[in-house]
Image: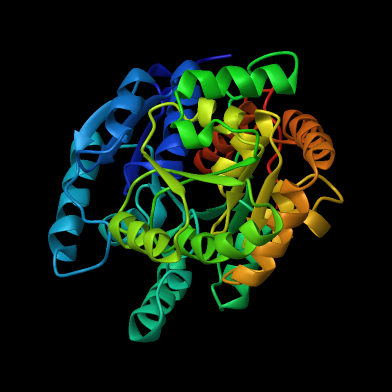
Amino acid sequence: MPAQPWAAKPTTVLHLAQPVDGGVARVVADLVRAQTRAGLRAVVGCPPGGTLAGAVREAGAEVLTWHAGRAPGPGLPAEVLGARRLLRRVRPDLLHAHSAKAGLAGRLAARGSPPTVFQPHAWSFEAVTGATGALALRWERYAARWADRVLCVSEAERRAGEAEGITARWSVIRNGVDLDHFRPGGPEPGQDKARARAELALPADFRGDGPLAVCVGRLCLQKGQDVLLRAWPELLGTVPGARLALVGDGPDTERLRRTAALSGTSVLFAGSATDIRPWLRAADLVVLPSRWEGMALAPLEAMACGRPVLVSDVSGARESLPPGQGRVCLVPPEDPTALAKALGRLLADPRLLAELGEQARQHVRTDFDVRRTTDAVTGLYHELLGRPRPSNQERISR
């Protein structure tokens, strides 16, 4: 059989991304790593700074600078023009735009040519209120016409879009984690935890026997650390020896420090961590009280390390948890009283924490392998380009 004309050169995918850190950066790096191994040419357009550029270069991508702010603003015309220049330079077979800003500028620049995948990583209209939120929703309804596929990371994220009147060609491919990277640090949870705490060299007042809760994430409104700090004094009335570490940095760092100081709560602000695994393994419980998500990576990474999680009931949370854990590991968002009660029940029961952690580890190893995620995304590309799918790739959910 004669070779197909497109087989002479690798398929080129332009990933346009903003933000350049956190979960979005990790997702893009995982995709690039898998696509490069599969023989695709991956190019990433992103702003300087953050962790993304270095991670995707290491994963095999070419990185081009795209100047774009995180929030919408008067710089949008220049951002669209910059995205258009990248498209002309790279001439990709497919554009994959990640998160709200890249989705906005990328779709305006491409207008459906080349084939375009837009991946919200949580809806922009959930992050803002008032006139800005209304405008974001109007934009998403209108711009869906310029996406050959809107790719959601959870069924809940897709349903949220549909409920708000977005008419799109949908695919759902759930997030996954690298199970070789995120795993328990030893055969026994107790040894694993002690080793991690020794590695972190925790302050003296964090070395006691009381349970340790860890919250990993950017210190910002979305991740809800302020809700956790409001819940913590009430929790201490139930579990006096409990300790809390916030791992990450962000725009709300100083405000959160003031909140902790005013409440008289002893909280460790650990700052950002290049490798979060020691923090996950050191924890008795990993908490993420987000206000909105698509499907958060931190709880999946914690569960892969054998740690139970307590999360707010936002998009993707129920789909992340092992069957039956929702009754004890889910709380309403923005409800510090409910969060304090759930923390008290869990942190007061080491046996329950160990049982939930083992269930979580097995669940993630079965259902959230990143290789399944990346294979499905690459399969989606082949589908949109009308090209044969590799036989080992799994079908995506609809």
Q: Quadrant of the N terminus?
A: top right
Percent position of residue 358, x then y: 80, 31
Q: Is residue 213 above or below residue 181?
A: below
Give the mark count. 0
Q: Is residue 173 above or below residue 199?
A: below
- Seen at 62% across and 65% down, the residue is 234
Look at the image and tell me whether residue 313 can be seen: no
Q: Is residue 220 left or right of residue 153?
A: left
Percent position of residue 198, x then y: 52, 19
Q: Is residue 301 above or below residue 129?
A: above
Q: Is residue 365 left or right of residue 226?
A: right
Look at the image and tell me whether residue 94 can be seen: yes
Q: Is residue 90 left or right of residue 139?
A: left
Q: Quadrant of residue 127?
A: bottom left
Q: Is residue 394 left or right of residue 181?
A: right
- Seen at 20% across and 58% down, the residue is 80
**Way the structure is coloured:** rainbow
Percent position of residue 230, x then y: 52, 66
Q: Is residue 216 above or below residue 330?
A: above
The residue most toward the bottom is 131
Percent position of residue 39, x then y: 46, 18
- Seen at 36% across and 28% down, the residue is 42
The residue most toward the right is 324
Q: Quadrant of residue 44?
A: top left
Q: Nearer the viewer, residue 4 or 46?
A: 46
Q: Nearer the viewer, residue 179 or 227?
A: 227
Q: Nearer the viewer, residue 59 or 283?
A: 283
Q: Quadrant of residue 155?
A: bottom right
